[in-house]
Image (cartoon, rainbow, N blue to C red):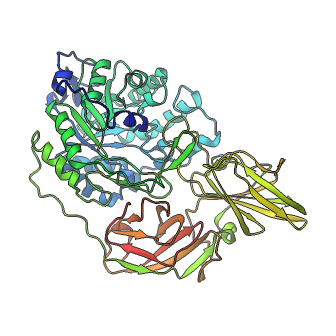
Amino acid sequence: MAEFSRRRFLGAATVSAASLGTVLGGSRTVLAQSAHPSGLTVRGDEFLLDGKPFQILSGAFHYYRTHPDDWRDRLTRLRGMGLNTVETYIAWNFHEPHKGETDFTGWRDIAAFVRQADKAGLKVIVRPGPYICAEWDFGGLPAWLLKDKDMPLRRSDPAYERAVDGWFDDLLPQLVDLQATRGGPVIAMQVENEYGSYDDDHAHLEHLKNSMRSRGVDSLLFCSNGASQEMLEAGNLPDLLATVNFAGDPIGPFAELRKYQPEGPLFCTEFWDGWFDHWGETHHTTDPAETAGNVAKMLKAGASVNFYMAVGGTNFGWYAGANLDGDHYQPTITSYDYDAPIGEAGELTAKFHKIREVIGQYAELPDEPLPATPRRMPAQTVAPTSSADLLDCLDALSSPVHRSPGPVHMEALGQAYGLIHYRTKVPGPRGTAKLSVSGLGDRALVFLDGERVGTFDRNQPGATVDLTVDGAAGTLDLLVDPTGRINFGHGINDPKGISGKALLGDEELRDWEIRSLPLDDLNGCRFRPGAAPAGRPAFHRATMRVDTPADGFLAFPGWDKGMVWLNGFALGRYWSLGPQVTLYAPGHLWREGSNEIVALEMERAGDRIELRSEPDLG
């Protein structure tokens, strides 16, 4: 989804003198169809599915943001809303975090997700990228593309397109036999994603289209973009269906689409029924009645719609993305509830019921009763009982140790996620000098001889930390805490760790010892009873007993910033900046009896961890 295009149309002036039908009326001709006569095709202003008129009533549901044991539940709820289709992005980095190691099993079994949608009575729209935005780390691109931090991305670059073709070699065989052209539920696929918000390299779009076609994709292909002529012209191919993404009143955006594409079905591929949050902002919500009213306008005009999002989800682990507002870095929170009709934990919201009521005026609703809210566990509070100082765990958490004349960004070392640690010796004795760091992604804790002496943050460029070395030499530690990679715009080349230099005054510090800390296995840490020393990053462990596992929400009152693991699974980040207060912990991650909660706190630990029965997103 494109933040800039939403800004343009959120609250934009409508075409006030005419109804949607008047603005968009007129005779149309046939657009280019899919490469196959069955499945989803185009005739004039309408879609046909296997030769019969079909209005797409779709909802976005990201399989990678919901525990796979809950896929069927959320798909059932989506169908209960009155929808006939589910749409999903495919996150390349979720399937191939390390080059050449693709995974389509378990949580990553995209074919299983599509088959479950089929069983739930839903058609499927797939948006395979390779770039997806989605407020997902690096817009879904894999971190290993940044081994060369300046690699050209999303354009006609041979190295990039070879990587994409290799990805499609692995991905598309999972999907081609599930297309509606072959009796399956997949009715359409997208080429790239909102490309008009990024570039106008039509040769690259042609390459992607041809790459998909040559690998067996014979479904209807489309391009979606923000609703402006500039974006539509830059981000589409003339022989593919153009669609638009927007929030609010549909008249203006659909009128823009008609100016660009005089014939063809009207399709809003992302109707933004909510919005996402950055750390340090207020929680975004939208009015259910107003949202439903705009849906009614689209359905009355015969337009198709995909609700973005229909099902809220979670940026588990390290996968939350980030934005740039000018030079200001804005990391996205762990929750992707999005104020969606179906909440992050499966709640059927007021927005769900308002939209369902409107859909019921234009389509037949399922006869089955709506499912109840998923069961939640009763509240309880526990205290951490042991801790492990992170700097004391370096040897257990990092292997091998890299040595380099200067700092190196983490992707160059083959590391995708986690923290990264840099250590060097500072000759002394010397009086106070100012330490500075360039190319920081995104926050660095500074230690001299084990004592915390300062912090660097990418949103405070030019900041310095005073260092004084009393003895013959001092040990300087920089522990870098990355948050999400940029997922939208021209700042997506966003390497983590340190990609520049560390200067002490005018002197470049050299001879670095670098430890990658992916933190995917914490078993090597030695936990000791009690709390870790104040001011040092540390793991804090608590035990929570559960009689009957169900959904819960973890809160960390008095804590500052960190990452949480539940029974070894990385739930995601917390941060006292808010707005998010609780982390969603699906019932499938809990065990009957004893459960281990580990929090890596970077600043100050609180004295308790709370399990709550209700979410608090601020």
Q: Is residue 512 left or right of residue 554?
A: right
Rendering coords of residue 342 (x, y %): 26, 54
Compared with residue 151, is residue 77 higher up or lower down, i.e. above or below? below
Compared with residue 534, is residue 162 higher up or lower down, i.e. above or below? above
- Quadrant in the picture for residue 22: top left
The reply to whether residue 514 is visible in this rendering is yes
**Farthest residue, direction bottom:** 529
- Quadrant in the picture for residue 519: bottom right
- Quadrant in the picture for residue 422: bottom right
Q: Is residue 313 left or right of residue 103?
A: left
Q: Is residue 542 left or right of residue 257?
A: right
Compared with residue 52, is residue 328 higher up or lower down, i.e. above or below? below
Instruction: Please state, as top left, top right, bottom left or bottom right, where the N terminus lies in the image.
Output: top left
Residue at 38% over, 74% down? 611
Is 70 or 170 nearer to us in this picture? Answer: 70
Is 113 or 352 nearer to us in this picture? Answer: 352
Instruction: Please state, as top left, top right, bottom left or bottom right, where the C terminus lies in the image.
Output: bottom left
Residue at 61% over, 51% down? 442
- Counting every numbered tag in the picture gives 0
Rendering coords of residue 374 (x, y %): 25, 65
Rendering coords of residue 4 (x, y %): 43, 35
The reply to whether residue 122 is visible in this rendering is no
Compared with residue 595, is residue 246 higher up or lower down, i.e. above or below? above
Residue at 51% over, 55% down? 318
Rendering coords of residue 431 (x, y %): 87, 61
Is 216 or 560 nearer to us in this picture? Answer: 560
Residue at 16% over, 30% down? 302
